[in-house]
Every structure is written in structure tokens, then in C-alpha cells.
Image: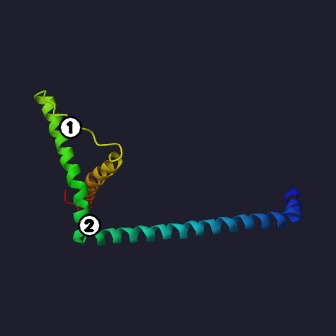
Amino acid sequence: MLAKIAQIFLGGPFNRIFDTVDHAIDNETQRQGIRANALNKYAETAVLDRSDARKYRIFWVAWGLFVFPLGFWWSLVLIDTSLTGVFHVRLGIADLPDSIQPKANLIFASIFGSGGVALASQAIASAIRGRR
């Protein structure tokens, strides 16, 4: 009985408050959905732009200007490490300058990361198809 009386006197304002809260939550959900769709579209466009850039020779020339010297330095570091470990001979290969090191780390991560992702995706795809 007390619940009925409370609902009669308080039901209207509370129902309006709860409806307003529900409406605000629905609007926020729609905003997040729109934001997610926009980010998804941007990511798809960025992937297409990057794959399109790889079709041009200048992309590979610019890529080679950064990667080949870095690969040569890395090879020298590996040779120096091997010679030091086996023959106790040190070549004294210097570390990269602090201004170049972050970019070099990014290049290494992109080369080895893309290879690892490609290998993992091929393994997953072959496992899904049933060919191990």
C-alpha cells in the first residue's frame, strides 16, 4: 500500500528522470558508434594509401636510403659481437647517435614486426583451413 502511494506521488518525476538518463545513455552510445565508424574508415583509408605508395619506385628508393645503411651498421654490430664472443677480438663499432636511435628502433620494429605479423597470419590462416 505504501509503495502504491509512493508511486502515485513520486512516480512521475522519477520516471521522467530515468527516461532522461536512458536517453542520454542512448545518445552517448550512438556517439561512440559514430566515432568508432569514423576511426575505422580512417584506418582503412590509411592502409589503402600506404599500400598505394608501395607501388611507386620512389617509395622503395627512399625506404632503401634509410634501411640499407641501418642494416649495414646492424650487420657490423653482429659481426663485432660474434668476433668478441668467439675470438675475443673487438672491432669497436660505435653505437648510433641519440638523435638517430629512436628512428632506427622504429625501422627495426617495422621490418621485423611486419615479418612476424605476416608469418603469424599465414600460420593462423593455414590452421583455419586445416593445413598445418
Q: Dot 1 corresponds to which residue?
A: 93
- In-front residue for pair 127/24: 24
Residue at 21% from the left image edge and 51% from the top image edge: 69
Q: Earlier in the sequence, mark 1 or mark 2?
A: 2
Q: Does dot 2 land on a helix, a strand or a loop? A: helix
Q: Does dot 1 land on a helix, a strand or a loop? A: loop
Q: Is residue 86 left or right of residue 40?
A: left
Q: Is residue 47 left or right of residue 129?
A: right
- Residue 72 lies, in percent from the top left, at 18, 48
Q: CA distance from mark 1 to mark 2?
A: 30 Å
Residue at 28% from the left image edge and 42% from the top image edge: 96
Q: Dot 2 corresponds to which residue?
A: 59
- Residue 128 lies, in percent from the top left, at 27, 61
- In-front residue for pair 120/71: 71
Q: Is residue 80 above or below residue 16?
A: above
Dividing the picture into quadrants, the one containing residue 34 is bottom right
Q: Callout 1, which amino acid?
A: Ile
Q: Callout 2, which amino acid?
A: Phe
The quadrant of the image that shows the C terminus is bottom left
Nearer the camera: disc 1 or disc 2: 1
- Res 3 label: none
